[in-house]
Image (cartoon, rainbow, N blue to C red):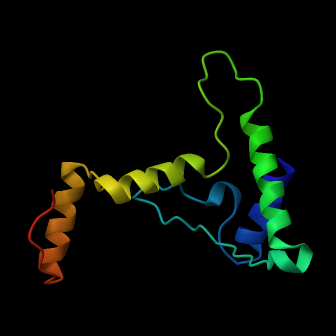
Amino acid sequence: YAISVVMDVLSGVLSASEFGPGVAGPYQPDKRSGAGHLLIALNVEVFQPLDGFNARMEAMIAGLKGAKLAKGAEEIFYPGEIEARNDQRHRAEGLKLPQDTIADLTKLGEEMQVPFDSFS
């Protein structure tokens, strides 16, 4: 809870964007999102040697993934792992889009005079 509040302060209040219930979700196309963004860039090597950091991260991930599974669960994922796997799969196999999305993109392409062969 505390981390969520701090992130809302940094990406919403500080950036003069919406915060809390003022932010509309990505699946509410009829509403302006109001979402703000926060970017933090850290040079790991200012804190410790990169090799040491990488080893410690691998140990942390191993600890997360090695925890006891909840009933019915097959695997524990660390934050971003599912997205990284999907990214690899999409790059190898392509990204499958719903037909209505393809139709919208086709119409937008025609309106913007951006030629393309087809989506498959």
Residue 92 lies, with reference to residue 112, above or below; the image says: above
Taking the view exactly as shown, the residue that stands out farthest to the front is 51
**Observer-nearest residue: 118 or 7?**
118
Residue 96 lies, with reference to residue 65, above or below; the image says: below
Is 31 left or right of 96, judged from the image as shown? right
Residue 114 in picture, x, y percent from top left: 16, 82
Quadrant showing the C terminus: bottom left
Residue 64 lies, with reference to residue 118, above or below; the image says: above
**Observer-nearest residue: 85 or 62?**
62
Taking the view exactly as shown, the residue that stands out farthest to the bottom is 113
Residue at the image point whose x is 20% and y is 52% from the top: 100
Quarter of the image where one finds residue 49? bottom right
Is 61 left or right of 56, judged from the image as shown? left
Is 46 left or right of 78, judged from the image as shown? right
Taking the view exactly as shown, the residue that stands out farthest to the left is 117
Residue at the image point whose x is 76% and y is 51% from the top: 58
**Observer-nearest residue: 37 or 33?**
37
Residue 88 in picture, x, y percent from top left: 44, 55
Taking the view exactly as shown, the residue that stands out farthest to the top is 71
Q: Is residue 28 visible?
A: no
Quarter of the image where one finds residue 21? bottom right
